[in-house]
């Protein structure tokens, strides 16, 4: 923790406890934590994510009381939750849509970190812990989607677990070990349930480390300039508890809109048909939050290379702190980097779009391009390739080179400096914006 | 071995296929609306009753609804809900419907298989004892369970309505329709191999279900004219309700939740503005 503790035990019991287990001091210090006063709404997603995790764990525990992890009963038990359990429909829709909300929030949180350089020294460990959380989230979400044992659950599990089969020599053995047999079956479902219950608590543990690692250097902020004085900060409580609280409440409004009015729009109709190994759905598509990676996987004709690139896309995030050569944290002062960043966001969205379509479908319908290598140039497979190329190019070429070649804008002296020099905040009576005075 | 092969085939399909499947076509489903859509949408109870009658007299001879119990018919929002009977098991109308069915059971004294009249706590009986029997009676095709059929199809209500009411009087000339198969423009399929006519093959596919509805096939108790269109609309309303019996409850609950969150957000916004008033940021 930066700064020394302001906590003073007030009662005899608190003094007694403080010398044995200073848990009240710990909580008080968390609440008093000096936080930059210029954090914008992009910084509220940390709190939103904590709420998402809490909601998923609470609804998940209740669902587990009614769910039956058996290939013969899973589908019907989920429907029993929807039909016969008191408010089961509410709990299940919150949990199912909650996964999507969790990913919306985590993607915004990650893009915010990318834009404002929150991964740079001294926050590398904080960033990497975040990447670990993201990996755990993906594993948890994938296994959770298998549990209703619908058609997309089953065939999605088949496709994803088979990816490990692409590994040379050990691939087959690993796949069999994951399945607990020679095909995706009851044993697979049962262990996925077990792991789906375990992983959220591991996420909660890593979240604890993530917050610890946050409280050592303190928050980054939109200027990317370090906190210089007490004037730059406000105590976390009540300033950010209230601001985050407002953002959380607005986020919950959006969440509730999905739960109550569009509960199935983010899912697939196929998953309301019980799993049948003998009937394969026309298009096996993962949930929307995996689509960019799915597009990268399919962009490569070779299965092993596809798997390597897909995982490589996540490895990029882990090594990013050492790829970025720029001394300036925030892209607010890096106009060129900002442009490439927005193209990067666009590339991720385009990749997601590609992942949702069959690879050989035309991107622009009705127009036939020309054949390039194995596919028409006007196809989603080629669009995925361009997207993937930019994705990796951004991390491996643009970010390292740009830091050395670009000319950043002047960076303010301190957090308070740009705030105080802003015309709207100038002291009353000062000759601010004389040009507006007619 | 077979399963492994299927698993690998599924992977190959996901990674590589597409061209072979891209030829699957169907007509866009017809638009219908009957007031259940939207945040305040409610079912029309009379329509649910008519729809249930269509299901019982037509669909249920081949299609099971394994997730449905007779008591569901009398629960809040159901076709035969009566506020006098908060426990749907006691609803006399539901009891009477259930009693019309003979349900397989075990005689607790002798252990013999017996049949007894149904009760509100019984499931809708399955028309076939097992999948093999269902296929044997339907030319090899398996009539899908209808419990969640509306949610199990893209644009479920529109699709089922279009399928049921969209059989043409005769298949297009030049289409080779095997006995036991029926052309339906809304059923996804690839008719290239069966098309002997001029121009591109028609959209749609060959389905094993004969046209199930006909004018006057079901007599509606409320005197509604029994057209194919009306029967299709009503049975789709019933199936939509059955696919998610708690939909009305969800939307009502949602209204309260949204109002609560709006007020709560407003209060927090006010607190935030007040608190930060003197902080330049």
Image (cartoon, coloured by chain):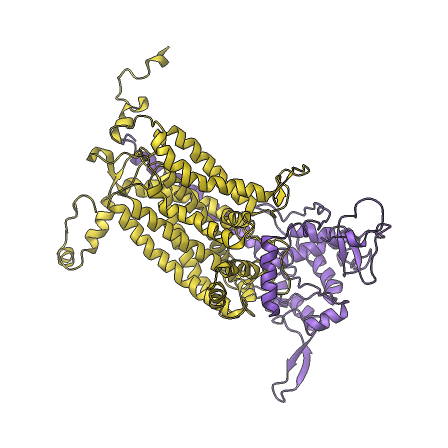
Chain colours: A yellow, B purple
**Depth check, front residue: B112 or B52:** B112
Q: Is residue B169 left or right of residue A241?
A: right
**Depth check, front residue: B4 or B159:** B4
Q: Is residue A325 left or right of residue A68?
A: left
Q: Residue at x 46, y 44 (%)?
A: A253
Residue A59 rendering spot, x and y as whole percentages? 43, 58
**Depth check, front residue: B154 or A292:** A292
Residue A112 rendering spot, x and y as whole percentages? 38, 39
Q: Is residue B43 above or below residue A245?
A: below
User: Where, by quadrant of the figure, is residue B209 drawn?
Assistant: bottom right
Residue A96 rendering spot, x and y as whole percentages? 49, 55
Question: Which residue sits furthest bottom?
Answer: B110
Q: How many marks?
A: 0
Look at the image and tell me whether residue A30 can be seen.
yes
Question: Which residue sits furthest top?
Answer: A438
Residue B202 rendering spot, x and y as whole percentages? 79, 48
Look at the image and tell me whether residue A68 can be seen.
no
Q: Quadrant of the C terminus of chain A?
A: top left
Q: Is residue A140 left or right of residue B98?
A: left
**Depth check, front residue: A302 or B221:** A302
């Amino acid at each position: 923790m930066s700064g020394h503790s302001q906590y003073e035990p007030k009662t005899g019991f608190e003094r007694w406890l403080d010398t044995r287990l200073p848990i009240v001091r710990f909580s008080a210090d968390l609440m008093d934590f000096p936080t930059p006063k210029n954090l914008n709404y992009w910084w509220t997603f940390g709190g939103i994510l904590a709420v998402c995790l809490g909601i998923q764990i609470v609804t998940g525990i209740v669902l587990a009381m009614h769910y039956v992890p058996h290939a013969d009963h899973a589908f019907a038990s989920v429907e029993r939750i929807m039909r016969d359990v008191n408010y089961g429909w509410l709990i299940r829709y919150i949990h199912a849509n909650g996964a999507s909300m969790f990913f919306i929030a985590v993607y915004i949180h990650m893009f915010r970190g990318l834009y404002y350089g929150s991964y740079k020294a001294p926050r590398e460990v904080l960033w990497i812990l975040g990447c670990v959380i993201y990996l755990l989230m993906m594993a948890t979400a994938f296994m959770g989607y298998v549990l209703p044992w619908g058609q997309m659950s089953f065939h999605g599990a088949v496709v994803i677990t088979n990816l490990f089969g692409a590994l040379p020599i050990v691939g087959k053995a690993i796949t069999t070990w994951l399945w607990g047999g020679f095909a995706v079956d009851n044993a697979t479902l049962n262990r996925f349930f077990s792991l789906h219950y375990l992983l959220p608590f591991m996420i909660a543990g890593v979240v604890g480390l993530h917050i610890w690692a946050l409280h050592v250097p303190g928050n980054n902020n939109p200027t990317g300039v370090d906190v210089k004085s007490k004037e730059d900060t406000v105590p976390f409580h009540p300033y950010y508890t209230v601001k985050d609280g407002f953002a959380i409440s607005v986020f919950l409004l959006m969440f509730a809109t999905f739960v109550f009015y569009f509960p199935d729009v983010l899912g697939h109709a196929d998953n309301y048909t019980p799993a049948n190994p003998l009937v394969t759905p026309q298009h096996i598509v993962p949930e929307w939050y995996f689509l960019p990676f799915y597009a990268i996987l399919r962009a490569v004709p070779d299965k092993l290379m596809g798997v390597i690139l897909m995982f490589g896309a996540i490895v990029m995030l882990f090594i990013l702190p050492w790829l970025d050569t720029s001394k300036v944290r925030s892209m607010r002062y890096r106009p060129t980097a900002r442009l490439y960043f927005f193209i990067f966001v666009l590339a991720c969205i385009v990749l997601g779009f590609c992942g949702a379509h069959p690879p050989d479908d035309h991107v622009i319908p009705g127009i036939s391009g020309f054949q390039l290598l194995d596919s028409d140039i006007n196809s989603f497979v080629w669009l995925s390739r361009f997207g993937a190329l930019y994705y990796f190019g951004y991390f491996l070429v643009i970010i390292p080179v740009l830091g050395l070649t670009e000319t950043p804008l002047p960076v303010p002296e301190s957090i308070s400096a740009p705030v105080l020099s802003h015309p709207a905040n100038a002291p009353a009576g000062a000759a601010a914006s004389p040009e507006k005075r007619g | 071995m077979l399963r492994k092969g299927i698993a690998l085939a599924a992977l190959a399909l996901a990674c590589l296929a597409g061209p072979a499947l891209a030829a699957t076509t169907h007509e866009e489903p017809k638009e219908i609306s009957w007031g259940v859509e939207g945040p305040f949408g409610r079912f029309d109870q009379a329509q649910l009753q008519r729809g249930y009658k269509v299901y019982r007299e037509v669909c249920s001879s081949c299609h099971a609804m394994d997730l449905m119990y007779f008591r569901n018919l009398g629960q809040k929002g159901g076709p035969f809900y009566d506020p006098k009977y908060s426990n749907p098991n006691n609803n006399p109308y539901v009891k009477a419907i259930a009693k019309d069915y003979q349900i397989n059971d075990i005689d607790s004294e002798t252990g013999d298989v017996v049949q007894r009249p149904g009760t509100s706590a019984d499931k809708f009986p399955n028309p076939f004892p097992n999948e093999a029997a269902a296929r044997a009676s339907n030319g090899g095709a398996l009539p899908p369970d209808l419990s969640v059929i509306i949610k199990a199809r893209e644009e479920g209500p529109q699709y089922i309505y279009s399928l049921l009411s969209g059989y043409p009087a005769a298949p297009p000339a030049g289409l080779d329709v095997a006995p036991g198969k029926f052309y339906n423009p809304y059923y996804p399929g690839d008719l290239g191999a069966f098309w002997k006519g001029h121009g591109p093959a028609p959209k749609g596919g060959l389905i094993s279900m004969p046209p199930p509805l006909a004018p006057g096939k079901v007599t509606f108790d409320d005197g509604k004219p029994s057209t194919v269109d009306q029967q299709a609309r009503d049975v789709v309303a019933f199936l939509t309700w059955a696919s998610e019996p708690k939909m009305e409850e969800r939307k009502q609950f949602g209204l309260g939740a949204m109002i609560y969150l709006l007020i709560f957000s407003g209060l927090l916004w006010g607190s935030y503005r007040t608190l930060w008033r003197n902080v330049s940021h």
